[in-house]
Image (cartoon, rainbow, N blue to C red):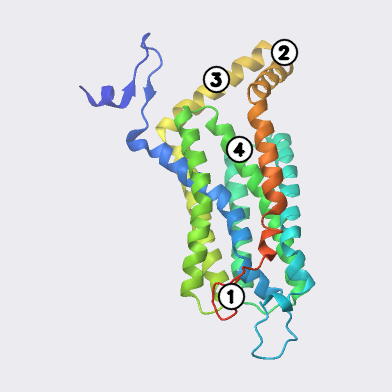
Amino acid sequence: MSKTEKTFDVEADGVDPSPKDRFRLIYIIFFFIGIGTLLPWNFFITANQYFQYQLRNQSLPTGVDALLPQYRTELQKVFSTYLIISSVVPATLGNFLNLMIKDWLPVYPRLIGSSAIMLIIFIITVTFTKVAIDTHIFFVVTLATVAINNVASAINQGSTYGILSVLPGSNVRGFLEGQAVAGIIAAVASIITIAAASSPTGVGFAYFLIAVAIIALTIFLFIVLFKNPYFQHYWSRRNVAMHDDASQGNKIKKTFVNLFLAMNDVKWTGITSFFIFACTLAIFPSVFILLVPANFDADSAWHS
């Protein structure tokens, strides 16, 4: 078999050769992109010890553990609630914004631009771990960066789903599996940094530096993706199909019909997902983060 025959699957009519995903490279790329899209959110909700330390009562006497439950400030108590609000509302707005700009801003600059914004946000967050700052200023700036990050993340995820829609379904699975693994990575990174670092700020520095590295990796992977022949093949077919639809007229009507049919197919899955997230996000992290274990040990590095 020739090299060409190994590389291409030729359809029955011999007209449309489709390149193979050699070594499942595209699947692996989307797996890591999936990790990169959800990791920022998972890092923010898992780095509780660092945020509680930055919002501590700084007027306590030297030697008093400001992270003990009895010394919690009002900002420490409400931070997680405001964190959720600063995440969910901007993410919703980001999804609408992505729909508004998709027709005049191509998907590639949307992906690279939103990823770059997320990278800058986490570089700022890393910087804050080494800078002494007033608790109220830290509270406001952190929530502002979280809001901006989630707008960028929503645009990034929406654009990624858009390019996944023109590829074989196995790539969607890789992306979703990567998002699932993001939570595990965040939890493992938290455990490692707490065990290795000597202070909460050291934990935060190492933790968010990992996020910077992973987001930088996703930017590199997006660049590699758009240069890959397998991706270019399916993406060029998508461009031809869009041109044909536009030339046939009734584009708006056809779009709404397709949207209605798609939503009807996934209505029960969507309703189920809505109630799952409504319940889980209502109690985690805003409520769970304030709970104290029955065997609480103030001398343990893990008591938070």
The foreground one among 126 and 191 is 191
Which residue is under mark 2?
250
Position of the C terminus by quadrant: bottom right
Q: Disc 3 to disc 4, how far (Cα)?
A: 19 Å
The foreground one among 284 and 98 is 284
* Residue 238 drawn above or below residue 86: above
* Residue 190 drawn above or below residue 155: below
Task: Write the residue at 38% across / 19% down.
Answer: 17
Q: Where does the image place residue 275, in percent across and percent down from the top left? A: 70, 39
Q: Determine crowd level at label 2: few under 14, some 14-19, many 20+ residues with C-alpha closer than 10 A.
A: few
Which residue is under mark 4?
159
Q: Disc 2 to disc 3, how far (Cα)?
A: 17 Å
Q: Disc 1 to disc 2, how far (Cα)?
A: 58 Å
Q: Which mark is residue 240?
A: 3
Which residue is under mark 1?
201
SS for dot 4: helix
SS for dot 1: helix
* Residue 264 drawn above or below residue 75: above
Q: Nearer the viewer, mark 3 or mark 1?
A: 1
Task: Write the residue at 56% across / 81% down.
Answer: 299
- The residue type indicated by label 1 comes to Thr
SS for dot 3: helix
- The residue type indicated by label 3 comes to Val
Q: Determine crowd level at label 4: few under 14, some 14-19, many 20+ residues with C-alpha closer than 10 A.
A: many
- Residue 210 lies left or right of residue 66; in this view the side is left
Q: Please report contact status of discs 3 and 4: CB closer than 8 Å, yes or no.
A: no
- First of labels 3, 1 by sequence position: 1
